[in-house]
Image (cartoon, rainbow, N blue to C red):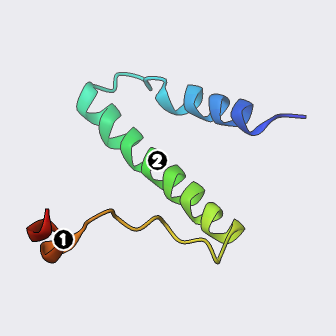
């Protein structure tokens, strides 16, 4: 059985390998969207796992709180 991290390692090894005579700009243009898509997929899977969970609210105090300091 392949673990999640083993699957990610295999995916990254395949994705990050330079293909043919690809230059740095071509490599970056190919790799970045793939990584962004994987991160978005993971984020959405996390949201599905806990639909009632919400991201933590920023600890911004607002103008009134700042004036009281």
Asked where in the image residue 28 lies, by quadrant, the reply is top left
Asked where in the image residue 7 lies, by quadrant, the reply is top right
Label 1 SS: helix
Residue 22, placed above or below residue 29 = above
Q: In the image shown, does 69 or 56 lie closer to the viewer?
A: 69
Residue 11 picture location, percent across and down: 62, 35
Give the residue drawn at x 32%, y 62%. Answer: 59
Q: Is residue 5 left or right of residue 66?
A: right
The residue most toward the front is: 68
Residue 30, placed above or below residue 10 = below
Distance Cα–Cα, label 1 vs label 2 = 43 Å
Residue position for label 1? 65
The residue most toward the right is: 1
Label 2 SS: helix
Q: In the image shown, does 17 or 3 lie closer to the viewer?
A: 3
Give the residue drawn at x 71%, y 66%. Answer: 49
Residue position for label 2? 34
């Amino acid at each position: 059985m392949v673990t999640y991290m083993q699957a990610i390692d295999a995916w990254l090894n395949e994705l990050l390998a330079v293909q043919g005579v690809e230059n740095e700009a071509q490599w970056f243009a190919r790799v970045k969207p793939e990584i962004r898509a994987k991160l978005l997929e993971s984020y959405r899977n996390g949201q599905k796992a806990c639909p009632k969970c919400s991201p933590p609210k920023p600890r911004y105090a607002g103008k009134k709180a700042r004036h009281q300091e």
